[in-house]
């Protein structure tokens, strides 16, 4: 697993942007963020799984998902190939 910050948090845009590679058969748990924080995830390669409230959302290459990140969530790769994603953390207005 590796994350690269493309744009650090910017007070003018209230967001930060990252690129992440998730290795095969890996789960990365994340704690709940603040009340108004949204995450936007775009899949560049592979099949990404988001586990949220015990539900699994599978997002393929070229697809995207957004969710209110005020609860625990898990980034997962349930396949045998690397997954590459870009994700935006938006801190709300």
Image (cartoon, rainbow, N blue to C red):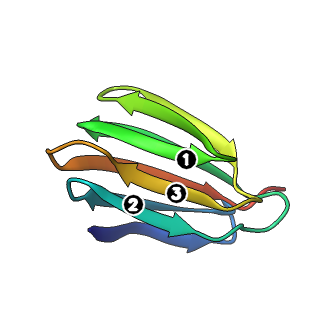
List the residue tagged with mark 3.
74
In the rendered view, does 68 fall on the left or right side of 66? right
Q: Do the residues labelled 1 and 3 touch (CB within 8 Å)?
A: yes
Query: What kind of element bears circle 3?
Result: strand
Q: Are marks 2 and 3 in contact (CB under 8 Å)?
A: yes
Which residue is at the front of the view, 45 or 12? 45
Residue 76 in picture, x, y percent from top left: 39, 52
Is 14 rendered above or below residue 43?
below
Q: Residue furthest front?
A: 54
Query: What kind of element bears circle 2?
Result: strand
Q: Quadrant of the C terminus?
A: bottom right
Gap between marks 1 and 3, in whole Å? 5 Å
Which residue is at the front of the view, 31 or 87? 31
Please tell me the numbered disc located at residue 27: 2
In the rendered view, does 39 fall on the left or right side of 18? right
List the residue tagged with mark 1.
51
Which residue is at the front of the view, 6 or 67? 67
Residue 30 in picture, x, y percent from top left: 57, 68
């Amino acid at each position: 697993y590796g994350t690269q910050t493309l744009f650090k948090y910017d007070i003018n845009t209230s967001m930060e942007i990252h690129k992440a590679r998730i290795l095969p058969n890996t789960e990365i748990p994340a704690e709940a963020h603040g009340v108004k924080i949204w995450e936007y995830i775009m899949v560049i390669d592979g099949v990404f799984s988001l586990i949220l409230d015990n539900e699994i959302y599978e997002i393929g290459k070229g697809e995207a998902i957004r969710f209110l990140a005020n609860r625990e969530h898990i980034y997962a790769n349930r396949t045998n190939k690397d997954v590459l994603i870009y994700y935006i953390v938006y801190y709300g207005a």
